[in-house]
Amino acid sequence: MIEDSSELTQFEAFVTTGVKTTDTFNAWRKKTNGIVQLFSLLQENSADVESPVTFDYTNATIRIKTDGIKTINIENAAVTGDKIANLTITEGKLSANSVTESKIGAAAVTEAKIANNAVTENKIGTGAVTTFKIGNLAVTDTKLAANAVIESKISDAAVTTNKIANQAVTGEKIANNSIDTLKILNGAVGTANLANQAVTNAKLANNSVDTLKIIDGAVGTVNLANAAVTTAKIAADSITASKLNGSQSGDAPIYAARAYVVFKANVTADNNGTFTRTPSGTTLDGMPGHNLQVGHKVYLERTSGGSFTNGLYSVTSVLSASAFVVDYSGSASTGGARARFWTILRSGNVSSVTRAVDNRAQFVINFTTALPNNDYATIGSTRWYDWVFNDEGSGRSNSINSAFIRTYYNDNEKISVSFYC
């Protein structure tokens, strides 16, 4: 303690002016001693005073050197927010877990502040993950809960073939009338798939019902169209007496004619044309509707031109509906010719009637379909003279294609003849 007052300047005397650099050394020394004197008095009297000594110096200034205030000099809770400069709290100043929820400002935790894998399920609010928060292709199969994908979640046409499991499309999944022809595999509709009475007439293609599709005995009379039972449809020896119209009796079989014809002896249908003879045969042309076939007989007469012998010839080739070739050969010659035909009034399996020889009462009957053999019976009649008979003889032999007949000739006679074998 400095007792000599001449060696100090009382603190009250310079509290407002402070210690200045312009002070003399002696003035500076005395002011310093005054400060020391002040603190010594405070220390000596600290036990005697009832409360801390206070100074009421409004303008007093205390200059503290850099780093002069230590932790021990700072009272607990003395450093308030106002005492802390902006941007002075660094990471190292914060103790673990010291930044609590109330210390974090709204929207302060940005993406950069969040560590990878730090946001767990509990940290995400209900309904917080919206469409925009989900990355493309992020919702994989394992992220979908069972039964989570309902109809409204599926885009139109999104369920392609690859998305449908085998056997998944059951009957109740298929809309009514949705299966058209293109959806059914060829041959997929079996008998078990057809409902009874489902195959109607409109469903059958033309000519699709063959013999195997018809049950034996299923075709009744009402199922047969008029004139549907032709000759080819009737089995041999199947026409019995009971099948014929009218009163029939007995067990003996009934046989029908193989061919028949009715014609008038004075009504001809001659065919005029041309002939061309060569060493291999004679061609007749310009005779439309001759109805001749190979093996038929035809009586020919020369009408003009070159050399030609009138007579009956056999047809060796049919070139067209108006031309044919006969077995008459010789040196080359051409001219006009006539084929002699008689007008047919009624017939069955007869295509033409021609002259046999240069005689008014001898004829040749040409069959449309050849008879099974040439041993057939000939039965005929005329209006006035009831006799017609087989006329085989020298150079005249019946064949399966043609038959010779003779009758009494009268210009107005109607001749009927039939053949059985």
Image (cartoon, helix red, strand yellow):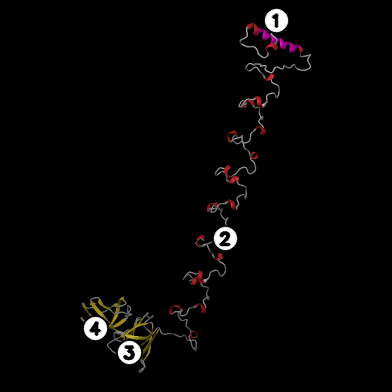
Residue 234 seen anywhere in this rendered image of the structure? no
User: What residue does disc 1 label?
Assistant: 6
Amino acid of disc 4: Arg
User: What residue does disc 2 label?
Assistant: 175
Give x and y (percent) for residue 158. 54, 52
Q: Earlier in the sequence, mark 1 or mark 2?
A: 1
The span picked out in magenta is 28-44
- Examine the image and state in which quarter residue 421 appears: bottom left
User: What residue does disc 4 label?
Assistant: 302
Mark 1 or 2, closer to the camera: 1
Residue pictured at 25% horizontal, 82% vertical: 337
Give the alpha-carbon distance from disc 4 to disc 2, as whole Å.
84 Å
Q: Are marks 4 and 2 in contact (CB under 8 Å)?
A: no
Toward the viewer: 372 or 69?
69
Give the alpha-carbon distance from disc 3 to disc 4, as whole Å.
22 Å
Q: Earlier in the sequence, mark 4 or mark 2?
A: 2
